[in-house]
Each structure stands twice: as structure tokens, then as C-alpha cells.
Image (cartoon, grey):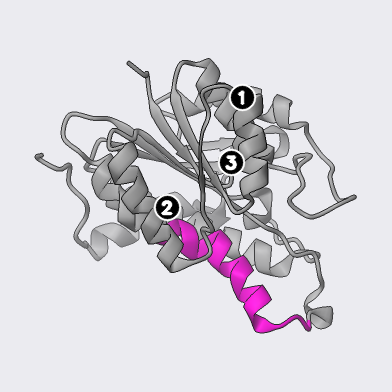
């Protein structure tokens, strides 16, 4: 029997693959997704026990197909990690790419996690099961990066969405975590753009925190213990006060 059952989007390389190794070493079942079948197959060969599924999280129909696949092969999922990403490093004034290219970045970073969460939260909320939903944002969600404007904007939006999702799931057994990497040496920004912490150091450091029920915001180095304020008050406190004034429906654990 597996300790946990884990889905990681964008898991064929970088942080996603590093986390996959950590979970597998801890005795968990892990399924990773990615666009590139060759890289997925290489990962599966290199890491015995790793399950793979080719999927483009930027496409709505592919997100729906992934949710159907998970309901079929991993109905006992306990960890959903929205890690798939891309980063276009180009100043706004120079960005003349076809809109479809820019839309793909938005759909990968923002539309994808929101839609997939909507599809899989009912599976995570099955009776008698504690689960964890992790959205991977970035230090760029807090300090905008002028060299990656659309990426920064999407990660900032995902940060706020995560706060709202945490509120929506607060009466359930599903924990909502924001994982906030600083610069990590991945292929995210393309060839020659890798810098920052090593993948191994980052994943090893944050993995223990991922397993702690009380940890909701997890960073590393300069993204550790980030606290955003507005006029001297913590944003999370202001949000709680706003939510109390404008109550909305929230999720509940499933009975079956």
C-alpha cells in the first residue's frame, strides 16, 4: 500500500522531476505529466516505478482527458501538484509574437491549474481521506520580473487564486499549499538562462515542509516566510475580514 498517491504536472524535468524523486523515495506512488513523450519515457527509464502520461496542460480538452485518466487509474489521489510551467523572457515593448504563443503561456501558468483543480477537487475530497493541493508560484509573483512580464503576471494571479482556493477549501480535509520557488537551475527560461539554487537542494529543503500539515506557504532562501502587506496590515488578515463581510459558498468533504 502506498503512503500517498501523487500527480505532478510538468514532471519530466526540473522541479517537477525533483519532487517526483522525493515522493518516490518516501514510498509514494507518483504519476507525472508533460508535453514531450520522449522526455517522459527517459524519466520513467531512469526512475523505476515512475508513472507517466503525455499531456498538454495548456489545452482545455487535454486537462479534461487528464482528469478522466486520474479518476480511472488513481482515484485515491492525495497530492495534486500544479507545477507545469513555461517562461517567455521578452520585454513587453519587444513582444511581437503571435497572440497564440502568448496565450499558451497564460494557459499553461494560470488557466491550466484553475481548470485542473476544478476537475480534480471532487476526487481529492472523497470521504475519509486527507489530501493536499499545491500550486507552484514564484518569487516573481511577489516582485514582478520585468524580463518575464506575462510569467510574473500569471504567477501573481495564481498566488491570489491560491489564497481564495484555500478559503474555499478551509472547511474540508484538503490542505492548499503555495510553493514559492526563488531562482532554481531549471530549463524554464530556455538554454543558457539557468541560475539560482540547484534542483536537488531546493527539493530536499522544501520536501519536509510539504509533509507538514501546518505548512501552507513554502519558500526557499529569499522566498522563505514571505508576508505581503497593504498599509501596514497583512493581506491575509485583510482578506479574512473581507470574506467575513461577503460570505460565499465553500467546498465540503464528500460523503461517498
Query: Upstream in the sequence, badge 1 or badge 2?
Result: 1
- List the residue tagged with mark 2: 163
The percent position of residue 66, horizontal first and vertical second, equals 40, 52
Report if the CB atoms under discs 1 and 2 are less than 8 Å apart.
no
Report if the CB atoms under discs 2 and 3 are less than 8 Å apart.
no
Alpha carbon distance from label 1 to label 2: 34 Å
Residue 81 drawn in magenta? no
Please identify the quadrant where the C terminus is shown: top left
Q: Nearer the viewer, mark 2 or mark 3?
A: 3
Label 1's element? loop
Say which of 137 and 224 sits in front.
Answer: 137
The percent position of residue 172, horizontal first and vertical second, equals 23, 40
Label 2's element? helix
Tell me if 241 is positioned left or right of 163 in this view.
left
- Dividing the picture into quarters, in which one does residue 80 lie? top left
Alpha carbon distance from label 3 to label 1: 12 Å
Q: In the image, what residue occupies the spot 77% across and 77% down?
A: 92
Q: Main secondary structure of the magenta part?
A: helix
Tell me if 161 is positioned left or right of 34 in this view.
left
Other residues around mark 3 within 10 Å, as few (<14) / some (14–19) / many (≥20):
many
Alpha carbon distance from label 2 to label 3: 24 Å
Query: Upstream in the sequence, badge 3 or badge 1?
Result: 3
Which numbered marker is on residue 11?
3
Report if the CB atoms under discs 3 and 1 are less than 8 Å apart.
no
Range of residues picked out in magenta = 96-115
Residue 164 shows in the view: no
- List the residue tagged with mark 1: 47
Residue 32 shows in the view: yes
Amino acid at each position: 500500500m502506498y503512503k500517498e498517491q501523487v500527480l505532478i504536472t510538468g514532471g519530466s524535468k526540473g522541479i517537477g522531476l525533483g519532487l517526483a524523486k522525493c515522493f518516490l523515495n518516501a514510498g509514494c506512488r507518483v504519476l507525472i505529466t508533460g508535453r514531450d513523450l520522449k522526455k517522459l519515457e527517459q524519466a520513467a527509464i531512469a526512475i523505476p516505478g515512475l508513472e507517466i502520461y503525455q499531456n498538454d496542460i495548456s489545452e482545455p480538452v487535454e486537462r479534461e482527458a487528464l482528469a478522466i485518466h486520474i479518476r480511472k487509474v488513481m482515484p485515491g489521489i492525495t497530492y495534486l501538484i500544479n507545477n507545469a510551467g513555461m517562461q517567455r523572457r521578452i520585454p513587453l515593448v519587444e513582444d511581437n509574437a503571435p497572440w497564440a504563443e502568448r496565450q499558451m503561456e497564460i494557459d499553461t501558468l494560470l488557466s491550466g491549474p484553475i481548470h485542473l483543480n476544478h476537475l480534480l477537487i471532487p476526487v481529492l475530497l472523497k470521504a475519509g481521506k486527507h489530501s493536499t493541493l499545491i500550486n507552484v508560484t514564484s518569487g516573481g509573483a511577489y516582485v514582478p520580473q520585468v524580463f518575464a512580464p506575462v510569467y510574473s503576471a500569471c504567477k501573481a494571479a495564481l498566488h491570489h487564486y491560491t489564497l481564495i482556493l484555500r478559503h474555499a477549501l478551509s472547511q474540508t480535509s484538503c490542505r492548499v499549499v503555495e510553493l514559492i520557488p526563488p531562482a532554481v537551475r531549471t530549463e524554464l527560461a530556455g538554454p543558457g538562462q539557468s541560475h539560482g539554487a540547484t534542483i536537488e537542494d531546493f527539493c530536499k529543503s522544501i520536501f519536509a515542509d510539504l509533509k507538514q500539515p501546518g505548512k501552507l506557504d513554502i519558500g526557499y532562501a529569499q522566498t522563505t516566510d514571505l508576508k505581503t502587506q497593504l498599509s501596514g496590515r497583512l493581506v491575509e488578515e485583510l482578506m479574512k475580514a473581507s470574506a467575513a463581510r461577503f460570505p460565499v459558498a465553500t467546498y465540503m468533504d464528500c460523503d461517498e
